[in-house]
Image: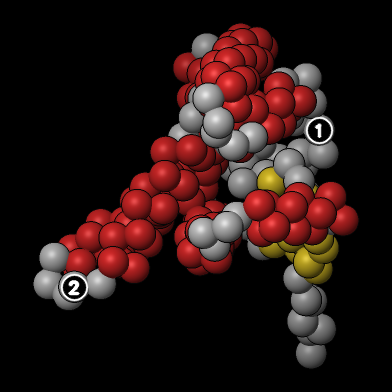
Amino acid sequence: MKERRRMRVSVSPGFLLALSILYYLDRQRILLWLLPGCLLHEAAHWAALHWAGGKVAALRVTISGVSMELRRPGIILSYPKELAIVLAGPAANLLCMGVAAFIGRWITAPALYLLSGLNLGLALWNLLPAAPLDGGRTLYLFLSWLISPGFADVLLQLTTFLTALIMIILGGYAIGHGGGFTLLTTGLWLLFQVSGWRKGLVNRALSV
């Protein structure tokens, strides 16, 4: 009888610290409404990975995102399958947005519109062409498939840098006009990802 292996789950102290700071600064408690969308997002990645034939051995949650370690690290996935895995997360958020908005047309519940809007925002955020977001990984995979991984890597670093720069500029403007630090800190975080976005990857589609 084969022994059933359990999936290992680890959460880094850096992620817990960042989550605590965000929760402390979140006076409207939007974070509590955002967490279900994040869980749905990652569950969709996990389901797509299993559909593609991969088995998750370990799940790691760090300040850079969520990474999944395959039970068989040497497994090779085709570019179409990898793209399906990466895009499954944003697709799930867009589906949730549509369902919540549709139900909200018939049931008067502000929470449904909040849930719809947050899932739309989560999908659009993840589709930005920056590493290690899904949009950046989609760009990398698509260009690697059509041209070459080297070209895709250079272009992704450029789009990540430009995205981070725009966020830093907008964040500085927001702070100067009485806004919060969200855009600025997010831009700095993306800037940090430019040089090391592939660090720790076992397979291109695993950090989702």
26 or 78, nearer to the observer: 26
Task: Identify the mark at residue 108; answer none if there is no mark.
Answer: 2
| Corner quadrant of residue 7 | bottom right
Instruction: Give the residue at x 42% y 44%.
Output: 121
Vertical order, 59 against 149 (above or below): below
Q: Position of residue 104 (x, y in %)?
A: 20, 67
Instruction: Give the residue at x 62% y 41%.
Output: 205
Callout 2, which amino acid?
A: Thr
Tag 1 near tag 2, CB within 8 Å: no
Judge whether residue 1 can be spotted in this image: yes
| Corner quadrant of residue 50 | bottom right
Colouring scheme applied when the structure was drawn: secondary structure
Q: Nearer the viewer, mark 1 or mark 2?
A: 2
Judge whether residue 81 can be spotted in this image: no
Vertical order, 107 against 131 (above or below): below
Callout 1, which amino acid?
A: Lys
Left or right placement of residue 123 versus residue 160 in this view: left
**Distance between the alpha carbons at the discs numbered 1 and 2:** 46 Å
> Where is mark 1, residue-wise?
199
